[in-house]
């Protein structure tokens, strides 16, 4: 049996994603986010730790992360 966890996202962000995927073949925001994360994990052109920290800082500044 698989175990799951919950990730909280700002409602505004979810609304933006819902609008973005409206005409795409994803049944939910969850499916889209999973697709994007898996795609990034499998990509050969990964980002450096410094870039990851900069992205996280920008997302926090925008209110998408705490």
Image: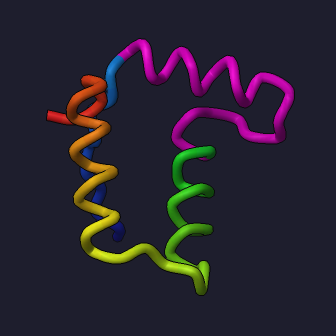
What residue do we see at 22% from left, 44% from top? 57
In the rendered image, the quadrant that contains the C terminus is top left
What residue do we see at 49% from left, 78% from top? 46
Residue 16: say if magenta: yes
Q: Which residues are magenta?
A: 11-31
Q: Position of residue 61 (x, y in %)?
A: 22, 29
Q: How many marks?
A: 0
Rendering colour mode: rainbow
In the rendered image, the quadrant that contains the N terminus is bottom left
Say whether residue 44 is left or right of residue 65. Answer: right
Say whether residue 53 is left or right of residue 30. Answer: left
Residue 12, picture quadrant? top left
Residue 21, placed above or below residue 16: below
Q: Nearer the viewer, residue 31 or 2?
A: 31
Q: Nearer the viewer, residue 46 or 2?
A: 46
Q: Position of residue 38 (x, y in %)?
A: 55, 68
Residue 16, picture quadrant? top right
Q: Position of residue 8 (x, y in %)?
A: 27, 33
Question: Residue reaching furthest left?
Answer: 66
Q: Main secondary structure of the magenta part?
A: helix
Say whether residue 28 is left or right of residue 10. Answer: right
What residue do we see at 59% from left, 86% from top? 44
Q: Nearer the viewer, residue 32 or 59?
A: 59
Q: Nearer the viewer, residue 57 or 12?
A: 57
Residue 14: say if magenta: yes
Question: Residue reaching furthest bottom?
Answer: 44
Residue 18, placed above or below residue 52: above
């Amino acid at each position: 049996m698989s175990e799951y966890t919950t990730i909280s996202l700002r409602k505004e962000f979810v609304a933006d994603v819902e609008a973005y995927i409206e005409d795409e073949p994803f049944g939910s925001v969850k499916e889209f986010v999973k697709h994007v994360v898996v795609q990034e994990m499998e990509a050969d052109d990964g980002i450096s730790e410094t870039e990851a920290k900069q992205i996280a800082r920008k997302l926090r500044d925008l209110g998408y992360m705490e």
